[in-house]
Every structure is written in C-alpha cells, then in structure tokens.
Amino acid sequence: MQDHKVASREEWLQARKALLIHEKEETQLRDRNTAERMALPWVKVDKTYTFDTPRGRQTLAELFDGRNQLMVYHFMLPPEWEAGCPGCSFLADHLDGTLPHLNHHDVTLLAVSRAPLDRIEAYKARMGWRFPWVSSFGGDFNHDYHVSFTPEALAAGTATYNFEPVEGDNQPGELPGLSAFYKDEAGQVFHTYSSYGRGSEELIGTYMILDRAPLGRNEAGIMDWMRRHDEYEDATPAKACHAEKVPA
C-alpha cells in the first residue's frame, strides 16, 4: 500500500464533504459546458463525402441510417497499419454497450478510418466489436475534419489539430477525434461539434472508474499501462498481426 494519511471516520467524513462541494461545482460546470455546446452554431456540409461500408458505398447523409443525429469517432487506422491505435482501441471497447440506447434516442454512432474496409473488418473481427465502422479510404473526410495530415501540410504549418497549428517532422500524421452531425428533414447535413485530444476521454468508462479507485489512474504517462484487450498476458492470443508502427 502506498503511504497515505489514515484518519478517523469523522476526519474522513469532513474531508469527503469538502470534496463533495468541488464535485458539485464540477457537475454544474459540465452542465454549463453542455448548454454552451448545444448552443454552438452549425455549419452546413456542402461537400459530398463517400465511404466504403459493409452495405456498399454510402454518402455521409446515408450513414445516419434513418436517424437525425450522427456521432463519428475518428479512429486511428491509416492504410499502412495492420492494427488500430491502442488508445483508440481502448476507447472503442466502451462503445458497443451504448448502441441500443443511442439508436433508440435518434443517434447513430460509428467509427471512421482511412484504412481500406477489409483491413477495418479484419481488425474489428479480431477485437470482437459490433459498432459500425466505415472506411474513408481515398477521400478527404479525415483531412477536412483535422485528424489526418499530409507530410506537406505538417511541413508547411498549415495542419491544425485541436484548433491549433501543428507542424514539424516529429508530428504524427494521424490523430483521434469525435465529430457530431445533424440531418434535417430536407436531408441537409450540418457539422455541429468536434473535439480532439483528451476531449473524448469521458467516453472511456474505465478511466471514470479508475478516477474513483484508491490509486486513481496510477500511470506514469497517458495510457502507458494499457494494452489492446487481447494483448494482456491472460488474454486470448490475437488473431491478426500487430502493426509495427502504431502510436500509443
């Protein structure tokens, strides 16, 4: 056990009540941010994006699957990788259980990656996931929503991530993100929200539990302890080859 203050029940209760004040402030701040998020202006998507899906070629509007709201997780799996980013995979482990609830609340959730569909399908089967996952291979979608970057854009300083410029040879060409879209009754599609970096962290239920565990996240670096779920020592061996170049 780590060195930690041990107190009486009365002392613990006093400290816990003090923390509760701050936790309530955090909840109220989250509610305020949610309201501001809902009030953001929308941007009409005039460009036609197409994706390879198990149902065939589909447009962005068709990905809504009969619903009005679409949440897209930008999953780091470019064409040259054999396996998805471990961090994105960690987040993706939390998605399947949300699907029936989201679908019955007018929300379609799916992932988009630049890898060809057969590469996506193979990795999805390896991981045992059910959520929809489509390919933007050969298209501009990932670049336009600022999660994929060409070497030229990074060198020129014209690439942006998390609404800030990124440049330099040491910058990755692929990063994660979350984007939201709305489709009205006329079939018009609007981009309503995007977040990057740690902005999607609340989707990772494991972290939310660890934040309340006695030792917290207990990590030296973000996700340094985490592995793909089939790569832990007591897990079933992976069915596919691992990527040689996958960022943590």
Image (cartoon, grey):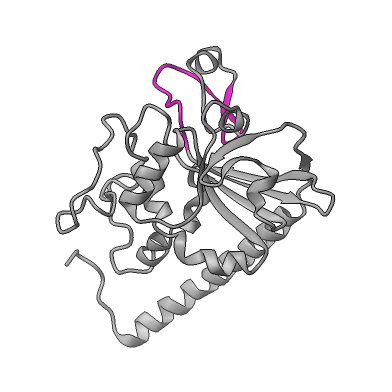
Quarter of the image for residue 69 reads: bottom right
Q: How far across and down, in percent of the image, does residue 2 sit?
A: 19, 64
Residue 230 on the magenta segment:
no
**Residue drawn 46% across the image and 66% down it:** 97
Quarter of the image for residue 36 reads: bottom right
Picture layout, residue 16 above or below residue 42: below
For residue 134, say whether it is visible. yes
**Residue drawn 20% across the image and 53% down it:** 232
**Residue drawn 48% across the image and 56% down it:** 131
- For this orientation, the residue located farthest to the front is 56
Picture layout, residue 246 above or below residue 218: above
Quarter of the image that includes the C terminus: top left
Quarter of the image for residue 194 reads: top right
Quarter of the image that includes the N terminus: bottom left
- For this orientation, the residue located farthest to the right is 186
Q: How far across and down, in percent of the image, does residue 148 sit?
A: 51, 29
Residue 207 horizontal side relative to residue 228, left or right: right
Q: How far across and down, in percent of the image, does residue 8 sit?
A: 29, 84
- Of 238 and 147, nearer the camera is 238
Residue 163 on the magenta segment:
yes
Residue 60 horizontal side relative to residue 44, left or right: left
Residue 133 horizontal side relative to residue 242, left or right: right
| Magenta-drawn stretch, dominant element (helix, strand or loop) | loop
Which stretch did the figure color magenta?
A: 159-175
